[in-house]
Amino acid sequence: MLEGRRSQWHATESGTDAISICLEAVIAPVTGLVPPRSATKLRVGFLLMHNFTLMAFSSFVEVLRLAADEGDRSRPIGCTWQVMTPGRRPARSSCGVEVHPTADLTDPSCFDYVVVVGGLLHGMPPMPAAIERYLRCAAELGIPLVGVCTGSFVLCRLGLMNGRKCCVSWYHYRDFLDEFPSLVPVADQLFMIDRDRITCSGGAGVADLAARLVADHLGDAVARKALNILLIDRPRVAESAQPAPRLAEDVSDNARVSRGLLLMEQNLAEPLAIAALAGALNVSVRQLERLFVNNLGATPQESYLTLRLRHGRWMLANTTLSAGRIAVDVGFADGSHFGRAFRARFGETPAAFRRKARDTRRRLPEAAEESRIFD
């Protein structure tokens, strides 16, 4: 099977603009020791996008490193990993730290998974054609592709997520819908495994995904050992809820409340009925009301209204849309209804708030830069 994959890779890359490939560079991090193929149970290739998220990459690699050997000796025995860029050029992370790759684009059949680590979404240069060809080839070979953080956007842009579920961070949910209106993202859990495509919302959830793959290939005990050394108490399963947008300083980590807030945040323009929300969370309406009051000090209806008004306020400050259009976008029947609710909550009209926001932006443009409602 491996030889068949390798032959197909060479056939795919035999053209005049073939990707530069170095088959001799099959994993030799730090120690320079390459374990026998029979000893290595998990092989991962990383592709780092420009301005990639350093935490997503480092969390994944650290779990592999600690799972690969006894203690933290870091010998690549049970796991191996390769960090690849075209031409082995350094990859810049979003925080400015550069990572030097261990290899050029390597035969994808050498890996059990190819992981795309995404990062900043906007203002990025075009994806190198070599990476696009590499990912398409890996998909044709049946190599499972993993998108972490906004790596899922990369896979979707290449059409490699068609017919599969895609997990994204709640923070990038609307970015995803804007770019891929025909796709429905999953934004209320940590990661999603859908056959040969795996997507992860990013952040600390990447360590949980890496631990899941380690458990699948090397066993649960090895995965727990790696996480425990990282001072992570226990792995979270794929379906664990992402942390929810904060309504107040004291927000419970109750999973159903978190999931409920995420569902609300994803359905602002057409608010869900509370009964439908309860049904999605597999609780009764009365149970849902108790959960919200006990954890947030507010009913589901009050919490939903808070989210809608906060988003409306953000749109007033950061867009040129009319108050009437904003009202519709956050689920109000008209501008008058929105205006009354806005004034009751914030003590001023939408027009007065917008004037103040514009004055602030003119005086302190850098301080007025906001990218999200819940920053």
Image (cartoon, rainbow, N blue to C red):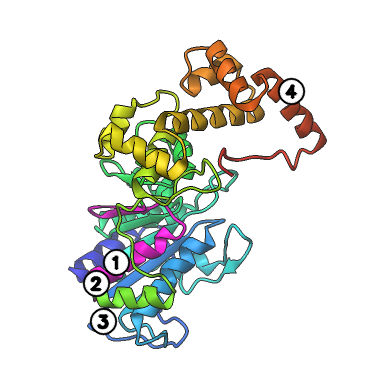
The residue depicted at 40 percent of the width and 23 percent of the height is 270
- Where residue 181 sits, quadrant-wise, is top left
> How far is mark 2 from mark 1, CA to CA?
6 Å
> How far is mark 4 from mark 3, CA to CA?
66 Å
Q: Amino acid at mark 1?
A: Leu
The residue depicted at 47 percent of the width and 13 percent of the height is 333
Mark closer to the chain start, 4 or 3: 3
Residue assigned mark 4: 355
Q: Which residues are magenta?
A: 190-218
Q: Amino acid at mark 3?
A: Arg
Residue assigned mark 2: 217
> How far is mark 1 from mark 4, CA to CA?
52 Å
Residue assigned mark 1: 213
Residue 65 seen in render: yes
Mark closer to the chain start, 3 or 2: 3
Q: Amino acid at mark 4?
A: Arg
Q: Are marks 1 and 3 in contact (CB under 8 Å)?
A: no
The residue depicted at 25 percent of the width and 55 percent of the height is 196
- Where residue 323 sits, quadrant-wise, is top right
What kind of element bears circle 1?
helix
What kind of element bears circle 2?
helix
Work out whether residue 294 or residue 30 is closer to the camera in this orientation and state it.
Answer: 294
> How far is mark 1 from mark 3, CA to CA?
18 Å
Q: Could you tell me how many numbered marks the image carries?
A: 4
Work out whether residue 318 or residue 240 is closer to the camera in this orientation and state it.
Answer: 240
- Give the label on residue 37, or none: 3
Residue 154 place in picture, x, y as percent: 43, 48
Residue 236 place in picture, x, y as percent: 33, 61
What kind of element bears circle 3?
loop
